[in-house]
Structures are given as structure tokens and as C-alpha cells.
Image (cartoon, rainbow, N blue to C red):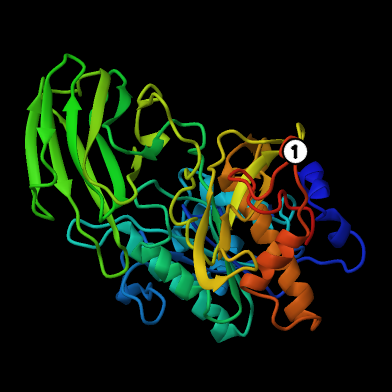
């Protein structure tokens, strides 16, 4: 299955003939919604599981029954390969009492199937490590910390077992400055240096959602129009800017009521409440952090009754003191708001989701194999640019660029396994990402496991995949925000 996509990505050329790669002895860690471990996709020819372990963070440890988290961790339950095989031998009904791991959404099952499924997967010989991400408790930390623990466990397990690890993250969110500066992004960059690992992250599906706009305020005010759809129960707006730039913000409701937020007079970390029509506005002025010099202005729109006032809201940025005048605005992801809620003049660039903005991950966009075209939903990126302090022969500063996304892979009408059996077609960067994770596993098998290149991990995997990529016909200039520096994955 997915034979066309694999052929276009040059996967078939290395798995069906010399060197006959399968990803053997490489760990593919899928951090997602769980897995249906009973499916044939995750068993070997003898019917035994190909899953090394499942760490279900959603469950509570039970020491009396011997159900405990991995050593050194406090949440969830770790189910070993032996336990999973025992459950398989009992059959689905009784086995799920022994290993009660489920995948309600089917997302994790689909992702694992594309990366390393026996029938659909790119690397059908890889060992799977499944980490079902937990939900935060009322008195606990947010899900970000659980993701961090999952990544930490995966890369350290690779060190413990002496095996290379590919970590697959097929999700993201829009909250942050999108420049790789958050605690999570920095953590992932550091984690990528542990052992022989590579971390692969999807660029998200916000490219055509209308949830981002950006621009430059110069000598006069700049107005941004935002459509709020019917029956919106709440909405937040992030405004990111350089700390040195100072704006005042005028907000005008659909009915013409207006309020001016004197941001130049507000103290940092101070919140201001205003009421326009039946919508309450809570504005928070952030401050720079030790690892991030950007400043956030966060606006929370809270309905006075059931819903926000629908219609066109206007946000006017009035310059007070400018250095660059640059600003970026983000709404919550498309799945968390009405399709009618969007900026009137959206900016599709810089719509890759966090944490695909981390510098040392492989950021994956999506394209349509059958049409040989870029998938419009795929999150678009940007170029980090900075001077290295030297000058070129013309006397100008040399610029070093780090392009996101790093590569694109098949992400439209991908065949995936579904819980309880069967297959379906799905689209999204969630399913382009495991194509690259599988390809990375094949590369690491060839290099590390077979002794051709013991240092084939991390940034080197990214470089090899990018070198082997080719452009799409419709895109002539590279780098670009759709496909990065090179294009679509065609080699492994």
C-alpha cells in the first residue's frame, strides 16, 4: 500500500532491491494518541509484536498490580514487549484487559502505520516505541511537559539499547513567536543531541486557514481586519513584536464601539479588561524572557453571554516608538475555531506550527503525489537569517540562512490502518511526517547498523535527505516557504 507514494519518494528502490533496507534495529518512536497494537501492521511474520514498549501517559500507576511508569518517571504505565505479546496470545477481548491501551482518534495508529507498518510502512523492519501522550491533570503541568518527558525517554532508551532512534511528532500548535525561541523548541534542539537520534516534526495544516497575518507599521497606523464567525464561544489573538517597538492598540467591534489600549503606558505583565458590545477583552502585555527577546501582546476575547459578537473586528496599531515596526498575529489553530473566523488579509508564510520551528528538527511539509503539486493546507515556513560578523568581497555582511520547512513528503490521500481493522485515505502533514521518519530509519540502518557511516544521525540525516530532494515543477525559486531549500523527498 502507498506504493505510488513510496516509489515517488525512492523508497521502493532501496527496499525491494539492493541494499534491501527495512529499518531493522532502528527505533521509530511515535509520540501520539496511542496505537491499536493488535493490528497485523504491527506484528512480524510469526505474529509477535514489533513494538518495543508502549508508555501510556494517560493511565495511573498501580504498584500493587505491577503497572508502573518507566524507571525515573512518575506518570503513566509502561507495557513491555513481553506484556504485549502475552496480550496478543489472549486475543483482543481478554488481551486488552492485560494491556488496556487504546487509540480513540486513530491518529497514532495511522502515523505508526505509515512510518513502520508491516504493509503500509516505509520502514517495516523497524522497532516501534509508542508513547501515548497524557492529558494534564487539574493540579499538574500542561501537556508540553509530558511531550518533553516522552522525547527524553525515547532518546535515552536508544542510548540504553545502543540503537539509533527516530522520533516522530505529527502535531503542533500555533502558540508562540514561531522563531524557535520557546522552552519547548530549545528543549527539542538539546534532546536531538542525545545519542544517535533524529527528530522529525510536521509543519502543520495552517497554510490556508487564514489564522496568521503580518506586516510593518511605519509612520502611520496599520489596520488589521478580523472576521469572527457566528457561534464562536471564545477566541484569542497573539501579537508578537520586537521589544524595542512600542505600539498603542485600538480595537473596534463590529457595531462600531472602540477602545484604545495605551500599551506604552502599561506595565509589563499587566492585564487590562475592556467591554465592547457583549464581548469582554482581556489584554495582557508580556515581557521578554531570558531565552526570548520578543514581546507578546495577548488578547483574549470572552463572550458576555454565549457567543462573541460576530462580524468584522478591526485592530489598529498606532506607532509610538519604532525600531523595525514588524508585527505578527496568530489565531488558534483551524480546528479550534470556526472556518469563518480568519484574518481578511492573511499571510500564509510563517504558518508552520510549533514545535516544527525548532532549528535542529527535520520539518516536513506535504505535497500531492498524483498532481505533483504542493498541498495548500501545508504549513509554510520562512528563513532564519543573521550575520556571522564577516564581510563579503563587496563589503556587505555575510548572511547565513536556515530554511524551514526542510523537506516535503507525500501527504494527500495516504492509505493508513485504522483501529479494529481496515484502512482509509487521509491527508495532512501528520502523514507526510512519518514518510520522512521512515526514510530516516532506512538511512540510519544503512549508515549505522550496517557500518557504512556510523555518524549518520542528527543534522547529517537532514542534510542527506535535503541533498537528494528535487523541486516541484510549479516552484522555480529555492529556498521558498513551501518546500524549503530543496523540495520533495526522493531519496533515502
Q: Quadrant of the N terminus?
A: top right
Q: Nearer the viewer, residue 9 or 331?
A: 331
**How many numbered tags mark residues here?**
1
Residue 471 in view in this figure = yes
Relative horizontal placement of residue 67, taking residue 200 as reference (left or right): left
* Residue occupying the point 79% across, 58% down: 491
Q: Which residue is found at the position 50% from the left and 41% from the top?
A: 349
Q: Residue 228: name its quadrant.
A: top left
Is residue 77 visible from the viewing direction of this image?
no
Q: Residue furthest right?
A: 17
Residue at position x 8%, y 28% from top? 275
As drawn, 428 above or below 458 = above
> What x and y, as percent, mark residue 77?
39, 68
Q: Quadrant of residue 160?
A: bottom right
Q: Residues within 10 Å of mark 1 (few under 14, many from 20)?
A: many
Residue 478 in the image: state x and y as whole percent: 68, 48
Looking at the picture, how far across and down is residue 295, in whole percent? 26, 54
Q: Nearer the viewer, residue 337 or 45?
A: 337
Q: Position of residue 153 (x, y in %)?
A: 46, 74
Residue lying at the far front of the rendered structure: 394
Is residue 66 rendered to the left or right of residue 474? Answer: left
Q: Residue furthest top?
A: 255
Residue underneath mark 1: 369
For this rendering, which residue is in front, 314 or 321? 321
Residue 171, above or below 476: below
Which residue is found at the position 24% from the left and 30% from the top?
316
Q: SS for tag 1?
A: loop
Quadrant assignment for the C terminus = bottom right
* Image-based side of 90 in relation to 354, left or right: right
Amino acid at each position: 500500500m502507498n506504493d505510488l507514494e513510496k516509489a515517488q519518494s525512492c523508497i521502493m528502490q532501496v527496499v525491494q532491491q539492493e541494499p534491501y533496507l527495512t529499518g531493522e534495529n532502528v527505533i521509530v518512536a511515535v509520540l501520539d494518541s496511542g496505537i491499536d497494537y493488535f493490528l497485523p501492521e504491527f506484528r512480524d511474520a510469526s505474529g509477535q509484536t514489533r513494538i518495543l514498549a508502549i508508555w501510556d501517559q494517560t493511565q495511573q500507576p498501580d504498584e500493587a498490580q505491577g503497572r508502573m511508569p518507566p524507571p525515573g518517571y512518575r506518570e503513566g504505565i509502561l507495557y513491555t514487549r513481553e506484556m504485549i505479546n502475552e496480550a496478543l496470545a489472549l486475543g483482543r477481548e481478554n488481551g486488552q484487559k492485560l494491556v488496556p491501551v487504546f487509540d480513540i482518534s486513530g491518529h497514532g495508529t495511522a502515523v505508526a502505520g505509515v512510518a513502520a507498518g508491516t504493509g503500509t510502512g516505509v520502514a517495516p523492519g523497524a522497532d516501534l516505541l509508542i508513547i501515548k501522550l497524557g492529558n494534564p491533570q487539574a493540579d499538574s503541568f500542561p501537556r508540553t511537559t509530558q511531550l518533553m518527558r516522552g522525547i527524553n525517554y525515547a532518546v535515552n532508551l536508544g542510548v540504553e539499547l545502543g540503537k539509533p532512534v527516530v522520533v516522530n511528532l505529527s502535531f503542533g500548535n500555533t502558540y508562540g513567536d514561531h522563531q524557535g525561541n520557546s522552552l519547548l523548541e530549545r528543549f527539542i534542539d538539546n534532546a536531538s543531541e542525545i545519542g544517535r537520534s533524529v527528530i522529525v516534526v510536521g509543519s502543520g495544516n495552517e497554510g490556508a486557514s487564514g489564522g496568521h497575518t503580518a506586516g510593518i507599521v511605519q509612520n502611520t497606523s496599520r489596520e488589521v481586519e478580523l472576521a469572527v464567525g457566528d457561534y464562536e464561544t471564545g477566541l484569542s489573538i497573539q501579537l508578537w513584536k520586537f521589544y524595542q517597538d512600542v505600539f498603542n492598540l485600538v480595537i473596534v467591534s463590529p457595531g462600531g464601539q472602540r477602545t484604545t489600549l495605551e500599551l506604552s503606558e502599561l506595565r509589563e505583565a499587566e492585564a487590562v479588561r475592556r467591554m465592547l458590545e457583549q464581548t469582554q477583552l482581556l489584554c495582557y502585555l508580556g515581557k521578554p524572557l531570558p531565552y526570548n527577546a520578543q514581546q507578546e501582546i495577548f488578547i483574549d476575547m470572552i463572550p458576555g453571554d454565549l457567543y462573541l459578537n460576530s462580524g468584522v473586528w478591526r485592530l489598529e496599531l498606532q506607532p509610538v516608538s519604532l525600531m523595525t515596526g514588524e508585527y505578527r498575529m496568530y489565531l488558534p489553530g483551524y480546528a479550534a475555531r470556526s472556518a469563518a473566523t480568519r484574518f481578511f488579509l492573511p499571510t500564509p508564510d510563517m504558518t508552520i506550527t510549533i514545535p516544527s520551528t525548532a532549528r535542529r528538527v527535520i520539518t516536513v511539509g506535504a505535497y500531492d503525489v498524483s498532481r505533483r503539486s504542493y498541498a495548500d493546507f501545508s504549513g509554510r515556513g520562512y528563513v532564519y537569517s543573521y550575520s556571522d560578523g564577516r564581510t563579503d568581497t563587496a563589503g556587505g555582511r555575510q548572511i547565513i540562512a536556515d530554511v524551514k520547512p526542510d523537506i516535503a513528503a507525500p501527504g494527500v490521500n495516504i492509505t493508513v490502518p485504522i483501529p479494529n481493522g481496515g484502512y482509509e485515505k487521509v491527508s495532512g502533514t501528520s502523514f507526510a511526517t512519518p514518510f520522512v521518519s521512515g526514510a530516516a530509519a532506512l538511512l540510519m540502518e544503512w549508515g549505522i547498523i550496517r557500518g557504512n557511516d556510523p555518524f549518520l544521525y542528527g543534522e547529517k540525516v537532514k542534510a542527506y535527505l535535503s541533498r537528494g530532494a528535487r523541486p516541484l515543477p510549479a516552484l522555480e525559486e529555492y529556498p521558498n516557504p513551501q518546500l524549503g531549500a530543496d523540495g520533495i523527498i526522493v531519496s533515502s
